[in-house]
Image (cartoon, coloured by chain):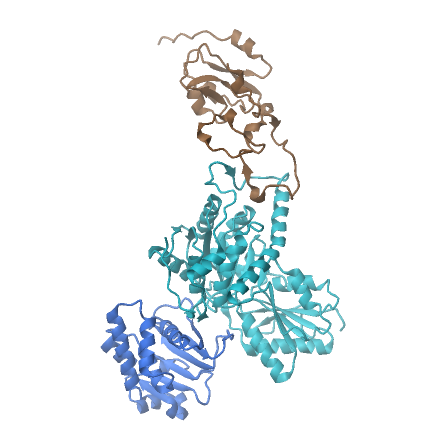
Chain colours: A blue, B brown, C cyan
Amino acid sequence: MVEIRWHSRAGQGAVTGAKGLGSVVATTGKEVQAYALYGSAKRGAAMNAFNRIDDKPITNHETKMSPDYVFVIDPALAFSDDITKNDKPDTKYIITTHLPKEELIAQIPELQDKKDRVYVVDCIQISLDTIGRSMPNTPVLGAFMKVSGMYDLDFFLENMKKVLSKFPQKIIDANMEAITRAYNEVK
Amino acid sequence: MSKGVLATDKRGVRELGAEKKVGWDEVPQGVVLNSFDDNVDNLSHLRPEERPYSDFNSFTATVASWRVIKPVYNRDICIDCQNCWVWCPDTSIISRDKQMIGIDYDHCKGCGVCVEVCPTNPKSLLMFTEAVDNEEALSGWPEKKKKEKK
Amino acid sequence: MAKKFELNEVEVWDGNYAASQALRQAQVDVVAAYPITPSTPIVENYGAYQANGFVDGEFVMVESEHGAMSGCVGAAAAGGRVATATSSQGFALMTEVLYQASGMRMPIVLTVVNRALASPLNVRGDHSDMYLGRDSGWIQLDAFNSQEAYDLTLCAFKIAEHLDVRLPTMVHQDGFTTSHKAQNVRPLQDEVAYKFVGDYKPVDDMLDFTRPVTHGAQTEEDWHFEHKAKQHKALMDSPKVIDEVFKEFKELTGREYKRVESYMMDDAEVAMVILGSSVETAVLAAKELREKEGIKVGIIAPRNFRPFPFDLIRDELDRENLKAVVCMDKSAPGGAMGALFNEVAGALTSTKARPMVTNYIYGLGGRDFSIEEAQRIMKEQKAHADAGHITTQIQQFSGVRGPKLGFYETRRGK
């Protein structure tokens, strides 16, 4: 079982991102869950989304999880959210930030003993450059592919195209570029 | 007056509420009441007395006993304007080919609306107590009233 | 003719999407709906299918949930296949018409995404709306995940419209936990799903002009009781058809449903009776507890909340090895024991084994139900079993902050 917790703001596409990831993973025969905790939250409110991935059907419906990966797709949430909550000794962090990795970690006491498990990528800037607006949900998946080695980039891109098929071609292309950039830029 | 129309087989054949009280196993599913015993293909072309009304249609029930006073109809004065037919709340004015032919006393409740709306002088419909015989009522029908001069 | 919707063998759908797809595949004639969180996407998706040519039927926008169910009753009386969706306050506003629909024997399918009832206002899932419907004369089926929300919605049409049943049917799923959680769902292709559901068979339809009928007639003390008795009989007889439909569904898909799902009950010493998505979590918790601590826990989950499977529940509970049973109610009980407790305790009174039974109120307003907490409660049942009497108060609260809250002491064997 692989468990992922997203830290996001309502409106940044964490739910869509989590469902997109789930859809891609499900095409490989795995079982998935993608859900969120947001309720009646307004745009901009801090929220969590979650993924579970396993080889057998997933029947655990408790919301709480001990994540294997934590995605922080809003830069400020790395400071204000409890991003290490319920973590494990090997939990990996993918954090959106414009700061160099060392500088970011220096400012977050909880990450001091986890330096080698922290990865940074500027999903906000990448999405601004490619998609044209701040939409860090798909880029973080590119970074995740690199960090986890779950799938080849090309395989992931192909399947993600299908998930996004309801959007205009221009948007799909921009997302593909964003994912690729994040894959290459994550450190 | 055509007796055939007013006295059909099914009109007012039972007191309201006198239908057979069947058990839960026999009541119709879903409080559905059928208007007719059989299927009817050309309903709009059938006159009431030709329709196979079921025991669950008010046509077959009589409420004559509810009435204290009754309208009596005078054919000799009526101009067949159909006003009473339009206004009667219980469809108890019976008319054929735009000609008024009588009152359905099984469903008339004696409200007097027909008398109220009758435009003739004297009125072609007047209210009498139930005990008064219709022939007797007709024999004492009032004369035409003269307009009062101002 | 509606367009075919391309579906993969495995889709990743949340419960709302799954339910909306089932409504689409059943080719409903009329959906009259007023959207409310968390069931909004069912109505939204259905509207999109209709607008994009995937549905031939009508979509009626109304001014309230009362209007929605009234529209459904009208359309069903006219002779159409009818469905809608709602939650919580919307369900509450529908309640008057729910009773009309069942009394008039209208086989409407209502997909309910369970949500707490205000006040306090809350959009998240508990079972207060589901419980509100329990005396409304509807068949109530309970889905524990998205796949089941899809499957049971298809089954619901077949059950509701069966000529021996003709009763409206609700398919419940948990707000957010199921409705907004995307999971692997294996849908049927459109033609297969429609063939399973079958063509609608109208009964006493008002659009049959050769046979005019009055629907929903007034009856007073001279007729009302007989009609309600007949309606109750139909509900009590519906399990035969429900079982048949589940059997047919299993033959088609391999997925098996039972009016009461039970897990690891054969050798169970303690059991948890529970509803909704928590069932799957509880099963996981029980398996773990068996492995780690050797406590023989079983789980009983009424799939069919109404008609309540009194006989099957009794069969599950009437085991010599079973000592303690806990009933989990995810609804504020309003000055009584939880409704599930009362139903189960009622079934227990005529068993030979007469296990001890206690009640937990849990998960109100979407409060998380964890494996850890499930196991704590299961271990508590084991303590009752070992002591030979209930060692706690009979009704307790799980997962609420503040001083311990509980009511009533046992008078048995202490």
Q: Is residue C220 left or right of residue A187?
A: right
Q: Residue at x 50, y 8 (%)?
A: B141
Q: Give the quarter of the image for residue C35.
A: bottom left
Could you say which is closer to the camera, residue B119 or residue B20?
A: B20
Q: Residue at x 67, y 77 (%)?
A: C382
Q: Does C343 sit above or below residue B143?
A: below
Task: Where is residue A94? Give x, y as percent.
Answer: 36, 84
Would you say residue A29 is visible in this rendering?
yes
Task: Where is residue C337? Give x, y as percent.
Answer: 63, 63
Task: Where is residue C354? Give x, y as percent.
Answer: 73, 67
Could you say which is closer to the camera, residue A83 or residue B25?
A: B25
Would you say residue C110 is visible in this rendering?
no
Q: Is residue C255 left or right of residue C357?
A: left
Image quadrant holding the C terminus of chain C, namely bottom right
Q: Is residue B20 left or right of residue A59?
A: right
Q: How many marks?
A: 0
Q: Does A127 sit above or below residue C16?
A: below
Q: Does C116 sit above or below residue B127?
A: below
Could you say which is closer to the camera, residue C174 or residue C267?
A: C267
Task: Where is residue A141? Give x, y as percent.
Answer: 34, 79
